[in-house]
Amino acid sequence: MGVGEGCIMVGKMTEDRLGLEPWDFPEERKRLVGEALERWDEGVLEEGVWAFLVRTRKKPDREVPPLVRFFVRWLALQGRRWPALEAGDIRAYLLWIKEHGFPGGTKGPLAWNTVERARGALGHLFRFLEWAGHPMPPHVEYPPRFTPYVQSRRPLTEAEWARLWALAEAYTPAYWRPLLQVLLVLVGEVGLTAKEVVGLWRADLQGERLLVRGERLREVPLSPLARQVLEAWLPLRDYLASHQPLPYPQLLLSPGPRKGKGKPLSYDDAKWLLKELARLAGMDAKRDRARGDLLHRLRWRAIRNYLQAGHPKEKVAYWTGMRSLLIPGWGEG
């Protein structure tokens, strides 16, 4: 046996002992995926996605590979050739399955949550292709979430807003009342998400405008009601900050008793307070799924008010971070 043959033998024995597969070798998986993309080989791509998930996720989702298979099949049926995909192929596929169902699978129309599930699976496809050395063509767009936009058909009504406001003013224990009003205006008047709300700093309040941090850094105008509520909150906020040895810079501080007083309001606490308010108002999403989560309905109230005031969609999408406003055909009807 020559030296070369011996090295190959030792390498093969090591590979078998470690339980390695072709997917563990960058050049080999690049070759496999490249050949599979050329002929739209559903089986190889499905297997590859699963190999990627088990190597990169603590709890890989077994539903992802079959959902990727359906998209690959749809591309083949459309006559696409890799990498000559069209920019809107993913959005077109999702809207197609909404009406017709999965190609060769469940018949449509599908629920929006199922469509969103398929969209999430294609996010894993993007990461798998990058891992395999064949990134998705940069012009192919990955659309934003469907679900919040669908819920826009039921923004909070002004009667429901008035009921929530009255409940916030009478909430027990009373020390939560000012903070509840601040939460309501930041979500229902300004249009922020719960994560953006708890991420605000005191210095972000800049007169008639609010600087919003996070993934989408932007400046947002404040309505008269929002300015009134936030300005009334500042003296109490500063009093709460004085209870900590080193005052926190966050805008929203907890008024709760004991050691927690003056500490930043957490994301979970913000969501819990709004859910409590929704429960008291009889707007619990678990009992009325058709209307959707209160946070989404509050945000869409803000969006509706912006649009009714005559602001262009582009501006409103920028202020609220709701990019789906700019996608034609979503949420119509």
Image (cartoon, helix red, strand yellow):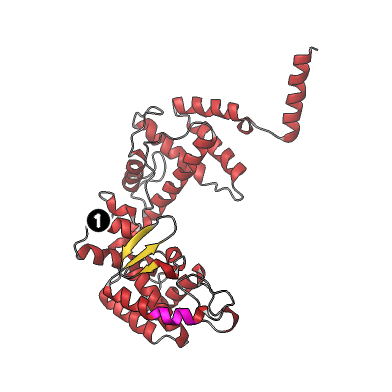
> Where does residue 277 sit, x and y in percent of width and height?
41, 78
Residue 234 lies within the magenta run: yes
Assign a secondary structure to mark 1.
helix
In the picture, which quadrant includes the N terminus? Answer: top right
**Residue at numbered disc 1:** 313
- Where does residue 266 sit, x and y in percent of width and height? 51, 70
Q: Is residue 101 among what the camera can see? A: yes
Relative to 174, residue 161 above or below: above
Residue 229: x %, y % from top left:
34, 78
Indicate left or right for 217 with 159 as reference: right
List the single residue furthest toward the left.
310
Instruction: Identify the main secondary structure in magenta.
Output: helix
Quarter location, residue 183: bottom left
> In the displayed image of the protein, which residue is found farthest to the top?
2
- Residue 158 shown in magenta: no
How many dots with numbers?
Answer: 1
Tell me: residue 83, above or below residue 4. below
Residue at coordinates 40% horizontally, 64% vertically from top-left?
A: 193
Q: Residue at x 68, y 33 (%)?
A: 20
Quadrant, the C terminus: bottom left
* Residue occupying image coordinates x 57% and y 48%: 60
Q: Which residues are magenta?
A: 233-239
Q: Residue 159 sits in which quadrant?
A: bottom left
